[in-house]
Amino acid sequence: MRPGRPKCPRRIETEPVATYFKPRGIPLKELEVVLLTLEELEAVRLSDLEGLSQEEAARRMGISRRALWEDLQNARRRMVDALVNGKAIEIGGGNYTVEGRPGYACRGCHAEWDMLSGSEEPSECPECGSTDIERRTDPPARGHGPGCRGGCCRKKDDPAGGEE
């Protein structure tokens, strides 16, 4: 990732059932842990497990091929490090939205965010605190999410260059 440039949220289709993997017979507290973000796992899942081309996988995640390639490289490096060096893998965190999950938009600052699993309906915008919010069922416009102001995802077919 280039310095100073915000990372656009990646779209993932599902969250994993298991969030830790570790070598057998060694207590987790004795292991070094490698963090694999959910968007890195999704990149590997789409490319390696589903066998999609990088172009198709990137399209499904709402990112560029270069961004997908960077996520794949990071994920593969971390997974191999854990396997070769006997480390645990923790899956979590990252900058992502989950497809099909109810989302919300602020009518005031135009922030968009997804509802987190098990959370209650929001009463205010997390960005500006406004109570003028609406529920949406479509994914955020052009894959943008909380904190994204549009400049992180430049689209060739977007004359505004991703700016809103």
Image (cartoon, grey):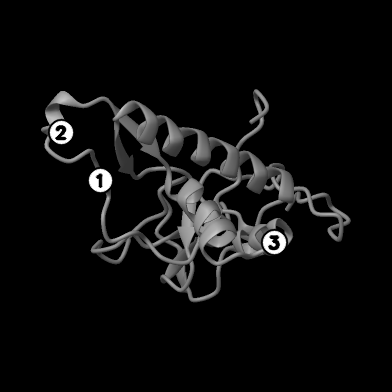
Label 2 amino acid?
Leu
Residue at 36% in and 33% down: 82
Badge 3 amino acid: Ser
Along the polypeptide, which appears first: circle 2 or circle 3?
A: 2
Left/right placement of residue 132 relative to residue 142 reads left
In terms of depth relative to the viewer, which is nearer, 37 or 134? 37
Provide the residue designation for mark 1.
20
- Classed neighbour count for the residue bearing mark 2: other residues with Cα under 10 Å, few (<14), some (14–19), many (≥20): some
Point 23% across, 64% down: residue: 118
Going by the numbered disc 1, the residue's amino acid type is Tyr
Residue 13 drawn at (x, y percent): 47, 66
- Badge 3 crowding class, 10 Å Cα cut-off, few under 14, some 14 to 19, many 20 or more, is few
User: Residue 113: x and y, percent?
Assistant: 47, 57
Q: Is residue 77 above or below residue 129?
A: above
Q: Is residue 134 above or below residue 36?
A: below
Quadrant assignment, res 5: top right
Q: What residue does disc 3 label? A: 53
Residue located 15% across and 24% down the image: 30
Q: Position of residue 38 (x, y in %)?
A: 43, 49
Q: Which residue is the site of mark 2?
A: 28
Is residue 108 something that shows in the picture? no
Secondary structure of residue under mark 1: strand
Which of the two discs, 2 and 1, labels the residue nearer the N terminus?
1
